[in-house]
Amino acid sequence: MAPGGFIHDKLDIKFLVLYLMARAAGPLTLTELLEMTSFDPGVNYFDLCEALSDLVRTEHLTLDGEGRYDITDKGRENGAVCESSLACSVRYHADRALSKVNAALRRDAQVRASLIPRTGGNYTLKLVLEDEYDAVMTLELIVTDRKEAEKMARRFKADAETLFHRVVAFLLEE
C-alpha cells in the first residue's frame, strides 16, 4: 500500500468498492473501478484486483462474462453498514468520480442499437433513443450488409442526439 492516502489496507479498498458499486448506475469494469479509485494513493491495481476477487468469492459482487462487476443485495447491505468507515474526503472523491461514470452509463443505457437477422440474408437494424421515462425515437431499417449495419449502429450510438434533432427538424419543416 502506498503511504499518504486515506485507504490503508485491503479492507478499506473493499469498503470503497462497495460504496462505489452501491451508487453506480450499472455494472462496472475493472478499468472503470481503477480509474474511479485512483484518487487515493493507497489503491493500486493488484490490491484492487484482489479485493474484487474476494468480494466476488464472498458474494458481495458478481462478475459477468464480459468482465463487469455488479453489486448483490448482500454487498449493498454490508456496504451500507461499513460506509461510515470511509473518510469524508474519500466519499467526496468517490462521488465526483461516480458522477462522470454514471452519466456515461445512463447514456449508454438510453442509446441502443441491435441487429436482427432476417430471412434472405438481410438484417433489421433497430435504433432506440430513450429519455429517463420512455423511448423518444425508435427507428428500424432493413440493411443488406452486416458490416454496414454495424457501422450504422456505431455511428448512432456515438451521436444519437444529432440524428434525433435532424429528424425532428426535418419533420417540422414547412
Image (tube, helix red, strand yellow):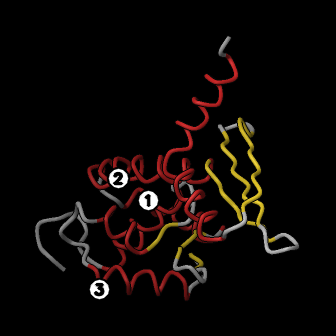
Cα distance between the residues tagged 3 and 2: 20 Å
Which label number is shown at residue 97?
A: 2
Q: Is residue 174 above or below residue 29?
A: above
Q: Is residue 44 above or below residue 37?
A: below
Quadrant holding the N terminus: bottom left
Residue shown at the point (70%, 62%) measured from the top left: 114
Cα distance between the residues tagged 1 and 3: 22 Å
Residue shown at the point (65%, 15%) measured from the top left: 173
Q: Position of residue 3 (x, y in %)?
A: 11, 73
Residue 169 lies in quadrant = top right
Q: Nearer the viewer, mark 1 or mark 3?
A: 3
Q: Residues within 10 Å of mark 1 (few under 14, many from 20)?
A: some
Q: Nearer the viewer, mark 2 or mark 1?
A: 2
User: Element under label 2?
Assistant: helix
Left or right for 92, reference 112: left
Pick the front one: 155 or 5: 155
Q: Are marks 3 and 2 in contact (CB under 8 Å)?
A: no
User: Element under label 3?
Assistant: helix
Residue shown at the point (68%, 11%) measured from the top left: 174
Residue shown at the point (58%, 30%) measured from the top left: 166
Pick the front one: 140 or 61: 140
Query: What amino acid is at disc 3?
Result: Phe
Q: Position of residue 77 (x, y in %)?
A: 60, 64
Q: Position of residue 65 (x, y in %)?
A: 60, 83
Among the two numbered marks 3 and 2 on one chain, the one whose residue lies closer to the N terminus: 3
Query: What amino acid is at disc 1?
Result: Glu
The number of discs equals 3
Which residue appears farthest toward the right when viewing the image?
119
Residue 151 lies in quadrant = bottom right
Name the residue beneath numbered marker 3.
46
Name the residue beneath numbered marker 1.
83
Query: What amino acid is at disc 2?
Result: Ala
